[in-house]
Image (cartoon, rainbow, N blue to C red):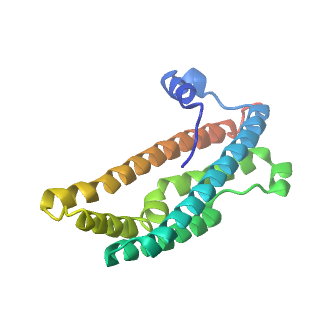
Amino acid sequence: MTDFSDDARLHGLWQGGDAVLAPLPLDEIKRRAARFGDIVQRRNRREYIAAAIVLAGFSLYAIILPGALLKIGSLLVIAGVLVVVWQLARRTSRPDPDAEATDVRAFYRARLVREEHMLARVGLWYLAPLLPGLLTFMAGEAILLGRTDALGLTLFLVLPLLLFGGIWLLNHRAAAMLRARIDRIDRAATPGDSE
């Protein structure tokens, strides 16, 4: 979901010790807030484009593919994608120009917190709505291909679960990185720190 292109740099900062975890100056917070807004906007654009492609593909599948499980699975995936798109629009952080002008640090922190909460709960709002449709579709595909034995069904059902597990892990990792940024902003806001 989230693209942290400077992942190697962040990993290096994490390993660098306390010196690199010093509080952020206000100018750096302004720069990071603007960059973070761009990252969120690009991520959302990619998610909406992917959702449109999945909706078109599974709509076509629901019409042309044989078998009730494939059709039901396609319709469940469509419903799941619509739920995910709605949740993404509802949960994602949005810029507030008035808040940004009054207190950049609080504005940036609030956006980070909102994104961290969204990423940490990706299993509930992003993966769970898609899982029933995808598993039903994969079971229908296994039946269509004649792989109704235990090994065949297991292989068809484990693949989406592995994919979803990877997505869940990546998002939890991104949420942990955002928590570290939030902690750093909190340290910078403690009394006695200069900007």
> With respect to residue 7, does 136 lie above or below?
below
The location of residue 181, given as percent across then percent down, is 60, 39
> With respect to residue 6, does 129 lie above or below?
below
| Total marks placed | 0
Q: Which residue is nearer to you in this view: 39 or 159?
A: 159
Q: Which residue is nearer to you in this view: 10 or 87?
A: 87
- Residue 68 visible here: yes
User: In which quadrant of the rendered view does residue 179 lie?
Assistant: top right
Q: Which residue is nearer to you in this view: 122 or 56?
A: 56
Q: Quadrant of the C terminus?
A: top right
The location of residue 24, given as percent across then percent down, is 69, 32
The location of residue 185, given as percent across then percent down, is 66, 40
Is residue 156 left or right of 150 when viewed as pictured? right
> With respect to residue 64, does 160 lie above or below?
above
Is residue 126 left or right of 46 when viewed as pictured? left
- Residue 109 visible here: no
Q: Which residue shows up at 33% across the image and 65% down it? A: 135
Q: Which residue shows up at 62% across the image and 56% down it? A: 49
The location of residue 182, given as percent across then percent down, is 61, 43
Q: Which residue is nearer to you in this view: 16 or 137?
A: 137
> With respect to residue 170, does 92 lie above or below?
below
Q: Which residue shows up at 67% across the image and 52% down it? A: 111
Q: Which residue shows up at 76% across the image and 30% down it? A: 194
